[in-house]
Image (cartoon, rainbow, N blue to C red):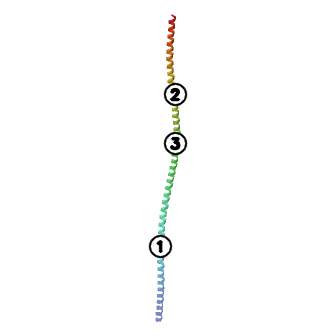
Amino acid sequence: MKQSQVNELESDIANLHTQLSDGQTVLSSVKEMLARAQQRLQEAINDVAEKDRQLVETIAQNQAMSQVLEQRKHEDAEVEELRNNLVAKQQSIDSIQSRVTDAEAARQHKEVLEFGARQELDIAREEVKRLKEEVSGLQTMAANAEKNAQAVSAEMQEAMK
């Protein structure tokens, strides 16, 4: 019996060695699977970290673009206001130019009228001068005629005496 027990124990030990060897093989296989799983997990963590970094970068770019768009809207509004001011200024310039043109035409018309009035004044002055000369000549003739009449009257009175 001891031998059978020893044989049995040796058989059990051999079975245990086989089971241990099989367990070590399974354990080794599980360790390899665990290492691959850990590697894939690390890759997934790295991938998630990269995606997070990209997401943060994309959000920052989106915020920057939003700020740029908001600034652009503000600048566009300023440009539109400047355009409207420019149109208003151009309309003012056009209005002023129209008034200047009208004033220039009125000034030229006034100059023509003044020129005509000066000519008429010069003609009138010449006419007054001529008439004064005629009056002076007639006054001289009248004075001479009166002297002659007085002389004739004095001669007639002398002759009547």
Disc ID at residue 43: 1
Q: Which residue is mark 3?
A: 97
Q: Amino acid at mark 3?
A: Gln
Q: Residue at x 50, y 12 (%)?
A: 148
Asked if the residue under mark 1 is in contact with the one under mark 2, i.e. CB atoms within 8 Å, the reply is no
Neighbour class for label 2 at 10 Å: few (<14), some, many (≥20)? few
**3 or 2: tag closer to the N-terminus:** 3
* Residue 85 rendering spot, x and y as whole percentages: 51, 47
Q: Which residue is mark 2?
A: 123
SS at badge 2: helix
- In space, the residues marked 2 and 1 are separated at their CA atoms by 115 Å
Q: Which is more foreground, mark 3 or mark 2?
A: 2
* Residue 67 rendering spot, x and y as whole percentages: 49, 58
Q: Residue at x 46, y 95 (%)?
A: 3
Residue 136 or 108: which is nearer the viewer? 136
Q: Amino acid at mark 2?
A: Ile
Neighbour class for label 3 at 10 Å: few (<14), some, many (≥20)? few
Residue 135 or 65: which is nearer the viewer? 135
Q: Which is more foreground, mark 2 or mark 1?
A: 2
Q: Residue furthest top?
A: 161
Residue 113 or 145: which is nearer the viewer? 145
**Location of residue 5 with respect to 96 vertically, above or below:** below
- In space, the residues marked 3 and 2 are separated at their CA atoms by 38 Å
**2 or 1: tag closer to the N-terminus:** 1
* Residue 119 rendering spot, x and y as whole percentages: 51, 30
SS at badge 3: helix
**Location of residue 79 with respect to 136 vertically, above or below:** below
Q: Residue at x 47, y 73 (%)?
A: 43
Q: Amino acid at mark 1?
A: Glu
